[in-house]
Amino acid sequence: MKGKEITVLIADDHVLIREGIKQILELEEDIHVVGQAGNGEEAFEMCESLKPDIVLLDINMPKLNGIEALRKFKDMGIKSKVIILTIHEDKEYILKTIKLGANGYLLKDSTADNLLKGIRRVAAGETYIQQSVADLVSTASDRDGTNDDTTDIISLLTTREYEVLILIAEGLNNKDIAEKLFISEKTVKNHVSNIFKKLELNDRVQAAIFAYKNNLKKL
């Protein structure tokens, strides 16, 4: 996103948290906080009017909580990308928000560097899931085990599609994947499309979570 300002809306019901995040973000030349919302309904209204690139969305908020707000964003066609920023380190919350279309997931104990990295990567069209969150989903999957149905679905992927899926989970965009695998970006797009279709996924974040959840490893 170099050369383009990233606009951010902060949605959290705690004023001190909003102000603290704003101070961190506005030290960066390429990030500008365009608004602050204290509840989910206000976040939705501000998204409609301000059209920020990124929404930092808390889960615990009055009127509409973060999950309800995210669902409303998607139902009403809000184009802003959403990063969940929450205290909840819970598998069910993580999977539910990702399923609803969140582009990233960060915990409030994350470092400022992680927050900035997440904003920039999501703004660039990538996904960003804090490593401890990804590890949590992966560890839970180890305990649960991969069922036979999931194994059958994974087996539908070609070796190259599997490789592309792993790289999506690492947060790489199509250009980076093409360079890493020495193939064209168009070929990568075709592979990504096939992965979504075979695994019945809607976007790259869901693909990343699928890889984490099923503890998929590099070949």
Image (cartoon, rainbow, N blue to C red):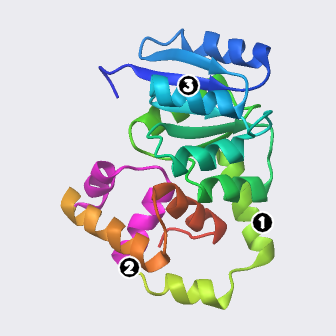
Is residue 160 located in the magenta-colored stretch of the structure? yes
User: Looking at the image, do the residues carrying marks 2 and 1 touch, with CB atoms under 8 Å apart?
Assistant: no
Vertical placement of 171 versus 145: above or below? Answer: above
Vertical placement of 212 versus 40: above or below? Answer: below
Secondary structure category for the residue under label 3: helix
Image location (x, y in percent) of residue 208: 53, 59
Image location (x, y in percent) of residue 56: 61, 31
Dominant SS of magenta comes to helix
State the residue in front, 65 or 121: 65
Task: Report the residue marked by disc 3.
Answer: 46
Q: Is residue 68 left or right of residue 83?
A: right
Quarter of the image where one finds residue 2: top left
Q: At x 53% / y 49%, what residue is drawn? A: 74
Residue 144 makes an appearance in the image: yes
Quarter of the image where one finds residue 45: top right
Task: Report the residue marked by disc 1.
Answer: 140
Q: CA distance from mark 2 to mark 1?
A: 26 Å
